[in-house]
Amino acid sequence: MAGAALAACAGLVAYGILDTGPSDDRPERRTPTASVTYEVTGRGAADITYQARSETGKATVVKAAALPWRKTVDVPVGQDPIVSIVLTEQGGQARCTLAIRGRHVQTATATGTFGRATCAGALSTAAGTAS
Protein backbone atom coordinates (compact mmCIF):
# COMPACT_ATOMS: atom_id res chain seq x y z
CA MET A 1 0.00 0.00 0.00
CA ALA A 2 2.80 2.41 0.92
CA GLY A 3 4.57 1.55 -2.33
CA ALA A 4 1.48 2.41 -4.36
CA ALA A 5 1.09 5.75 -2.58
CA LEU A 6 4.78 6.52 -3.13
CA ALA A 7 4.50 5.66 -6.82
CA ALA A 8 1.41 7.88 -7.19
CA CYS A 9 3.22 10.81 -5.55
CA ALA A 10 6.25 10.31 -7.77
CA GLY A 11 4.00 10.27 -10.82
CA LEU A 12 2.35 13.53 -9.84
CA VAL A 13 5.72 15.18 -9.24
CA ALA A 14 7.03 13.99 -12.62
CA TYR A 15 3.87 15.25 -14.34
CA GLY A 16 4.29 18.68 -12.70
CA ILE A 17 7.91 18.89 -13.84
CA LEU A 18 7.38 17.60 -17.37
CA ASP A 19 4.08 19.34 -18.16
CA THR A 20 4.85 22.42 -20.24
CA GLY A 21 1.24 23.61 -20.37
CA PRO A 22 -0.98 23.96 -23.39
CA SER A 23 0.81 24.02 -26.70
CA ASP A 24 -1.66 25.78 -28.92
CA ASP A 25 1.17 27.53 -30.80
CA ARG A 26 -0.19 31.01 -30.10
CA PRO A 27 2.51 33.67 -30.15
CA GLU A 28 3.36 35.26 -26.83
CA ARG A 29 1.63 38.61 -26.39
CA ARG A 30 4.08 41.49 -26.25
CA THR A 31 3.39 44.89 -24.81
CA PRO A 32 3.92 47.65 -27.38
CA THR A 33 6.79 49.99 -26.53
CA ALA A 34 8.31 53.26 -27.68
CA SER A 35 11.96 54.32 -27.83
CA VAL A 36 12.77 56.94 -25.19
CA THR A 37 16.07 58.79 -24.76
CA TYR A 38 16.97 60.30 -21.40
CA GLU A 39 19.94 62.66 -21.17
CA VAL A 40 21.47 64.50 -18.23
CA THR A 41 24.15 67.09 -18.95
CA GLY A 42 26.29 69.08 -16.55
CA ARG A 43 29.35 68.46 -14.42
CA GLY A 44 29.96 66.23 -11.46
CA ALA A 45 27.45 63.59 -10.40
CA ALA A 46 23.73 63.15 -9.85
CA ASP A 47 21.33 60.43 -8.76
CA ILE A 48 19.16 59.59 -11.78
CA THR A 49 15.83 57.76 -11.70
CA TYR A 50 14.14 56.76 -14.96
CA GLN A 51 11.40 54.56 -16.40
CA ALA A 52 12.53 51.69 -18.63
CA ARG A 53 10.94 48.50 -20.00
CA SER A 54 9.02 47.50 -16.91
CA GLU A 55 5.35 46.69 -17.32
CA THR A 56 4.92 47.14 -13.57
CA GLY A 57 6.10 50.74 -13.71
CA LYS A 58 9.14 50.05 -11.55
CA ALA A 59 11.82 52.71 -11.97
CA THR A 60 15.55 52.21 -12.50
CA VAL A 61 17.91 54.18 -10.24
CA VAL A 62 21.53 55.11 -10.99
CA LYS A 63 23.31 56.45 -7.91
CA ALA A 64 26.01 59.11 -8.31
CA ALA A 65 26.08 58.84 -12.12
CA ALA A 66 28.98 60.71 -13.70
CA LEU A 67 27.74 63.49 -15.96
CA PRO A 68 27.11 63.77 -18.85
CA TRP A 69 24.86 60.67 -18.93
CA ARG A 70 22.60 59.32 -21.69
CA LYS A 71 20.36 56.27 -21.97
CA THR A 72 17.95 55.08 -24.69
CA VAL A 73 15.40 52.48 -23.57
CA ASP A 74 12.07 51.00 -24.60
CA VAL A 75 9.14 52.08 -22.41
CA PRO A 76 5.82 50.21 -22.50
CA VAL A 77 2.94 52.21 -23.94
CA GLY A 78 0.76 53.17 -21.01
CA GLN A 79 3.76 53.86 -18.76
CA ASP A 80 4.68 57.52 -19.11
CA PRO A 81 8.45 58.06 -19.44
CA ILE A 82 10.05 60.12 -16.70
CA VAL A 83 13.57 60.99 -15.63
CA SER A 84 14.39 62.69 -12.32
CA ILE A 85 17.75 64.01 -11.19
CA VAL A 86 19.04 64.96 -7.76
CA LEU A 87 22.41 66.68 -7.54
CA THR A 88 24.90 65.58 -4.91
CA GLU A 89 25.93 67.66 -1.89
CA GLN A 90 28.56 69.32 -4.10
CA GLY A 91 25.67 70.99 -5.93
CA GLY A 92 26.27 72.62 -9.28
CA GLN A 93 23.93 72.60 -12.24
CA ALA A 94 22.55 69.80 -14.42
CA ARG A 95 19.89 69.60 -17.10
CA CYS A 96 17.65 66.65 -17.96
CA THR A 97 16.11 66.18 -21.40
CA LEU A 98 13.57 63.66 -22.64
CA ALA A 99 12.93 62.56 -26.23
CA ILE A 100 10.21 60.11 -27.33
CA ARG A 101 10.66 58.39 -30.68
CA GLY A 102 13.42 60.89 -31.48
CA ARG A 103 11.28 63.98 -30.78
CA HIS A 104 12.30 66.36 -27.99
CA VAL A 105 9.59 66.51 -25.29
CA GLN A 106 10.92 68.34 -22.25
CA THR A 107 13.96 69.95 -20.60
CA ALA A 108 14.42 70.95 -16.95
CA THR A 109 17.36 72.30 -14.91
CA ALA A 110 18.51 71.49 -11.37
CA THR A 111 20.82 73.86 -9.47
CA GLY A 112 22.48 74.02 -6.07
CA THR A 113 23.10 71.51 -3.32
CA PHE A 114 20.75 68.55 -3.76
CA GLY A 115 19.01 70.45 -6.58
CA ARG A 116 16.20 68.54 -8.29
CA ALA A 117 14.64 68.45 -11.75
CA THR A 118 12.18 66.15 -13.51
CA CYS A 119 11.38 65.64 -17.18
CA ALA A 120 8.24 63.70 -18.13
CA GLY A 121 6.24 62.91 -21.23
CA ALA A 122 3.23 60.92 -22.38
CA LEU A 123 3.29 57.96 -24.76
CA SER A 124 0.49 58.04 -27.28
CA THR A 125 -0.99 54.84 -28.60
CA ALA A 126 -0.63 55.99 -32.21
CA ALA A 127 0.19 53.41 -34.86
CA GLY A 128 3.80 52.36 -35.04
CA THR A 129 4.43 52.23 -31.30
CA ALA A 130 5.16 48.53 -31.12
CA SER A 131 8.70 47.31 -31.04
Image (cartoon, rainbow, N blue to C red):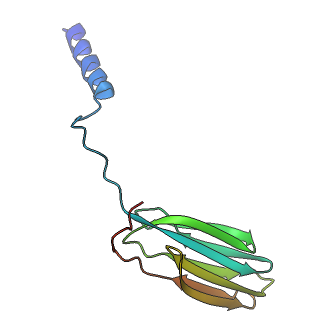
In the rendered view, tell whether residue 11 sits above or below residue 81: above
Q: Name the residue: 72% across, 70% down.
A: 65
Number of numbered discs present? 0
Q: Name the residue: 78% across, 87% down.
A: 92
Quarter containing the N terminus: top left
Q: Position of residue 112 (x, y in %)?
A: 75, 91
Left or right of 77 in this view: 99: right
Residue located farthest toward the left when viewing the structure as drawn: 1
Quarter containing the C terminus: bottom left
In the rendered view, tell whether residue 33 sits above or below residue 11: below
In the rendered view, tell whether residue 126 sits above or below residue 130: below
Q: Name the residue: 61% across, 82% down.
A: 97
Q: Position of residue 100 (x, y in %)?
A: 50, 76
Left or right of 130 in this view: 115: right
In the rendered view, tell whether residue 65 sits above or below residue 25: below
Q: Position of residue 19 (x, y in %)?
A: 28, 28
Left or right of 27 in this view: 66: right
Left or right of 52 in this view: 43: right
Q: Position of residue 28 (x, y in %)?
A: 31, 47
Q: Name the residue: 68% across, 85% down.
A: 95
Is 20 in front, or is 97?
A: 97
Q: Quadrant of residue 27?
A: top left
Is 128 in front, or is 65?
A: 128
